């Protein structure tokens, strides 16, 4: 599954937010089996209203949502890149994630100390990001010396890697995360292979006070402006409110959201933004036993999508019987959609679309 790391300075609301995420997951655990929760990893159901609709139509016994992992990466302080305190563990945890969500403190509260004694979300962002940049710098410098020797002996691969490393170093030495480097398309795979921390896509979570949950505030505006400049994603959340929402049943939750002037819980927005950030999308498998959502990247072919269910589905792929979500709903189910000519037989080259209801045929 896809993994999003939650980072930030101490006392910005990371744990509050993470606990709200996992409490919601725990509350849903009865409905959604196989929900495992480790201390710092939250395995969270992806909110997907279309899934319920499909299950109703097909009379599916069970609804199984897609999942996304959130990892609470505690222990970031200035100096983490030097392995102070929890530093090393912290960096190892971040390395494993697909994206990084920065929790930025956008609330005033004299009772909650700020490590720098001042509420300044952009300065906080820079403090945290600097640690990640320093870690990347150090790891690249280490690798560079070796590669340079190899490149001098005419090793082509070493040469290619070296030029990518220099591309990253150019950004980092200018105090910018490596994700700002312009990497030619044909080298993107090797670029990802460098496994840098500052090439991961980022998302800013502006943690605002309870009164600003719907509107945001002056601090969160700064965060959004920065996100726009950088082409990053941002969401306004009040972790405090999310922790209250997490304890409510569906109906009460909807009522509370309405009184707050919110269309969707912050956590749902967070998960959806994570999807957008990672270019993720959803397809469905629907039958009498279960209706299930699966997560894939945009642009994946039908066999790749099938591979998320099982490797054999990808290897032995023959075709995918495909009905777009809207047609499935409008026709009132699979057989009616088929009769109406809305079921297509798609082959190996088919690029799966968001909302496709799929049935894979494969050789074993
Ligand atoms: P962490 O160190 O980043 O994990 O921060 P915590 O989640 O432990 O939060 C630190 C303190 O800030 C706790 O006392 C929280 O109750 C408080 N806090 C977190 N989010 C909010 C918020 O949105 N508003 C207010 N007023 N306090 C918050």
Image (cartoon, rainbow, N blue to C red):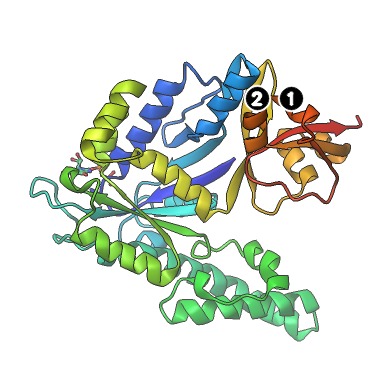
Tell me where residue 79 appears, x and y as whole percent. 33, 62
Tell me where residue 247 appears, x and y as whole percent. 30, 24
Residue at the extreme front of the image, as rendered: 340
Indicate whether 55 appears above or below 345: above
Indicate whether 277 appears above or below 243: below
Q: Residue at x 59, y 61 (%)?
A: 195
Quarter of the image for residue 264 reads top left
Q: Are marks 1 and 2 in contact (CB under 8 Å)?
A: yes
How busy is the neighbourhood of tag 1: few (under 14 within 10 Å), some, or many (20 plus)? some
Quarter of the image for residue 204 reads bottom left
Quadrant location of the N terminus?
A: top right
In what element is the residue under mark 1? helix
* Image disc number at residue 332: 2
Residue at the extreme bottom of the image, as rendered: 152
Q: Residue at x 67, y 76 (%)?
A: 184
Q: CA distance from mark 1 to mark 2?
A: 6 Å
Q: Which residue is mark 1?
A: 336
In the image, 35: left or right of 75?
right
How busy is the neighbourhood of tag 2: few (under 14 within 10 Å), some, or many (20 plus)? some
Tell me where residue 27 appears, x and y as whole percent. 39, 21
* Image disc number at residue 19: none
Q: Nearer the viewer, residue 183 or 332?
A: 332
Residue 110 seen in this snapshot: yes
Quarter of the image for residue 265 reads top left
């Amino acid at each position: 599954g896809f993994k999003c790391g939650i980072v930030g300075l101490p006392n910005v609301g990371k744990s509050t937010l993470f606990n709200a995420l996992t409490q919601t997951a725990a509350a849903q655990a009865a409905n959604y089996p196989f929900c495992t929760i480790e201390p710092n990893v939250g395995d969270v159901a992806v909110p997907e209203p279309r899934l319920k609709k499909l299950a109703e139509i097909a009379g599916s016994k069970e609804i199984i949502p897609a999942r996304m992992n959130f990892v609470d990466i505690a222990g970031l302080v200035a100096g983490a890149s030097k392995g102070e305190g929890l530093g090393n563990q912290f960096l190892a945890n971040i390395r494993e994630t697909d994206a990084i969500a920065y929790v930025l403190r956008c609330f005033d509260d004299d009772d909650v100390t700020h490590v720098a004694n001042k509420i300044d979300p952009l300065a906080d962002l820079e403090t945290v990001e600097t640690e990640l940049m320093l870690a990347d710098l150090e790891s690249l410098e280490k690798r560079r010396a070796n590669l340079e020797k190899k490149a001098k002996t005419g090793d082509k691969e070493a040469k290619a890697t070296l030029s990518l490393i220099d591309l990253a170093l150019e950004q980092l030495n200018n105090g910018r995360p490596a994700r700002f480097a312009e990497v030619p398309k044909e080298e993107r795979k090797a670029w990802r292979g460098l496994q840098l921390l500052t090439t991961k896509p980022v998302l800013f979570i502006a943690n605002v006070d309870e009164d600003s949950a719907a509107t945001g505030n002056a601090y969160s505006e700064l965060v959004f402006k920065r996100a726009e400049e950088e082409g990053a994603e941002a969401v306004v959340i009040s972790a405090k409110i999310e922790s209250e929402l997490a304890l409510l049943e569906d109906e009460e939750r909807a009522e509370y959201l309405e009184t707050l002037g919110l269309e969707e819980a912050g956590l749902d927005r967070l998960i959806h933004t994570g999807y957008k950030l990672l270019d993720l999308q959803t397809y469905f498998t629907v039958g009498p036993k279960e209706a299930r959502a699966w997560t894939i990247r945009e642009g994946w072919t039908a066999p790749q999508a099938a591979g998320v269910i099982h490797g054999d589905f990808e290897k032995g792929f023959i075709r995918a019987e495909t009905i777009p979500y809207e047609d499935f709903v409008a026709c009132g189910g699979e057989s009616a959609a088929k009769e109406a000519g809305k079921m297509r037989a798609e082959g190996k080259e088919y690029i799966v679309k968001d909302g496709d209801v799929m049935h894979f045929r494969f050789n074993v």
